[in-house]
Amino acid sequence: MNNEKVLNGIVSELTLKFQNKDSSYFFTRLGKAYHKIEKLFFSLYEKNDKNESYFKELLLSLGDLYSERSDDLKKIDILREEDKNWFMSPNWVGTMLYVDRYNKNLKGFIKKIDYLEELGVNYVHLMPLLSMPKGENDGGYAVSDYRSVDKKFGSMEDIENISEIFRSKNMLLELDLVLNHTSNEHEWAKKALKGEKDYQDMYYMYDDREIPNKFEESLPEVFPETAPGNFTYLPEINKWVFTVFNTYQWDLNYTNPKVFIEMTKILLNLANKGIDIMRLDAVAFMWKKIGTSSQNLPEAHTILQLLKTATKIVAPGVLFKAEAIVQPEEIVKYLGVGGEEECEIAYNASFMVYLWDAMATHNKKILENGLTHIARLPKGTTWINYIRCHDDIGLGYADKDIISSGYSPFDHKQFIISYYVGEFKGTPAKGQRFMYNPKTKDSRITGSTASLLGLEKALEDKNHTLQEKALKKILLMHSAIMTLGGIPLVYYGDELASINDYSYLDDNDKKNDNRWLNRPIINWKKSENRHKEGTIENTIFKGIQKMIKIRKEIKEFHNENDFTIITNENDNVFSFLRELNGEKTLILMNMSDHPQYLNQYIIEKTGIPFDSIDLYTGNKLNIVNREIKLLPFEFLWLK
Ligand code: GLC
Ligand code: GLC
């Protein structure tokens, strides 16, 4: 059948369905995107009768999902279509949290919305809360039913309720969509285990080790310590299933168009609950190919482009955030290459790692080289700039950034690891190794921001000087994410300087995963200290709150990734400029624990006035003998 005929057929079927409801927006968007969606779909799936009927099924379900979308959401869609850069304003400041560890459940969370408002946060990622297995579930990243909220958190109604409250307060709601795998308790998995072929085809299943062995020749392992290998044997059906992450997380087989269609419906069904941003989990892994690492393959990008195109037809107000914690040059591709639209937001994992590097070396060399080498983002896309999230910190920076900074990649990474796990002489950090590989000595790092920066050790040793330093470092790192260009994300608990939470060790389903160190249970009584002068909570909460408040007012702190690195003569001071319509702010960060000096030339060269004010303290710039002095770990926002 030719295009025209297919499209006309679909239009008449949908017109019948929509009956009298206004569907002009839908048809306009479909008409505009038709060639694109068709091209993308048939670039993944061979053109034959079967796949043509799948394609038709896809378009018809888009129609259904559009007619289910509420009028309120449709209005927002239209506004956001008209103002495509709506999320670029410096007004947005994010956080992420586990509702149960925050305040028990979704109803409990609602009671804490005013706390978030007090801090200034208006964009909230609620960590996985869809139905999940009772025992181990990878913090909810093993989903058993994408259409229901796990009973322990509440219900889908609670989510809709929160999204309504958020809309009335101009706040944004983000949820996860775990696209790469389902839990082994998902209905599809259960049917597959019963031997139903159609459902086995939703996953990658093999009768023997022949193909798995071929794959494994080039596949890295994500959890080598706790889930070695990439396949799991299923005795019930005598088959091997692809499981890149844990054994109970079965990888979905996107070579099967049915999988793609079902996941699209799931995505849009969630979008229709009022989700503003979908966090697309583990997107790098969505396509597999023997002989490759099965990460970042072009088809994974095609899937994302297809999902984006479908979403723009049904729910154009919804943004995608890519969770692709991969090499710097690969991350950028998830924001679209060559004008193709994929995700609008991605985690700036590289910047995060460079910051941790600078906090350990006390110099800016890798931070500056690294940022110089990463490509800038396409217009209309942005970063999440963050210090910590719920996962480990993987030292995924490019070797060339380490070499060009004068270090050897292996030795340097070993230094960073030993610094943060508390082995390097004199380090104040109390982190832990995650997924240590004895063969390569490689490992990732876990631990909370405050513990990695020395606060936990300072408290144990009752060392006041160390404590002061840790607090300064916490604020310095937050200053970086507030200003660089991207949406800052304050990890829950960091605004109270939460140290490592060891309670996960008492829980059998968590004790083998030390990422839980950094997933604190919030102590609300202690959080009251934020109102008490001189407490740790007060220093950090008020500091971050103040940064947020200022950031929102400074137009040049918008989310376009257009900072200019200003090189200077001092290896310990990182400096960059933000600029918009002639308004300028120069950021100076002293990464070291000694006072540092900069020649006033930096002021002349950037055109910042000599009597400029530091936005954060309100103090006038102090130049003595043509030099700017920065105290240990001090930062200045010079307007
Ligand atoms: C994502 C999550 C991580 C999880 C993994 C597997 O990367 O951030 O916590 O373990 O996906 O779903
Ligand atoms: C790696 C993976 C990421 C995963 C994480 C789990 O960073 O790239 O997808 O979630 O490990 O800790």
Image (spheres, rainbow, N blue to C red):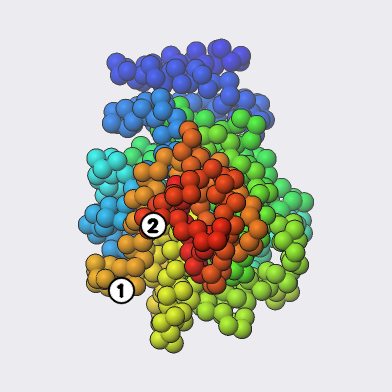
Q: Earlier in the sequence, mark 2 or mark 1?
A: 1
Q: Residue at x 46, y 74 (%)?
A: 469
Instruction: Return the x and y of residue 123 as percentages of the image width and height.
Output: 37, 48
* Residue receiving disc 2: 619
Q: Amino acid at mark 1?
A: Thr
Q: Quadrant of residue 73?
A: top left
Q: Is residue 208 left or right of residue 530?
A: right
Label 2 residue near ligand 1, CB within 8 Å: no
Residue 328, above or below 354: above
Q: Is residue 227 left or right of residue 215?
A: left
Can residue 524 be seen in the rendering of this structure? no
Q: Secondary structure at mark 1?
A: loop
Q: Residue furthest bottom?
A: 461
Q: Amino acid at mark 2?
A: Asn
* Residue receiving disc 1: 535
Instruction: Return the x and y of residue 196 as percentages of the image width and height.
Output: 54, 48
Q: Residue furthest left?
A: 111
Instruction: Return the x and y of residue 484 as percentages of the image width and height.
Output: 51, 49
User: Do callouts 2 and 1 mark residues in contact (Cβ within 8 Å)?
Assistant: no
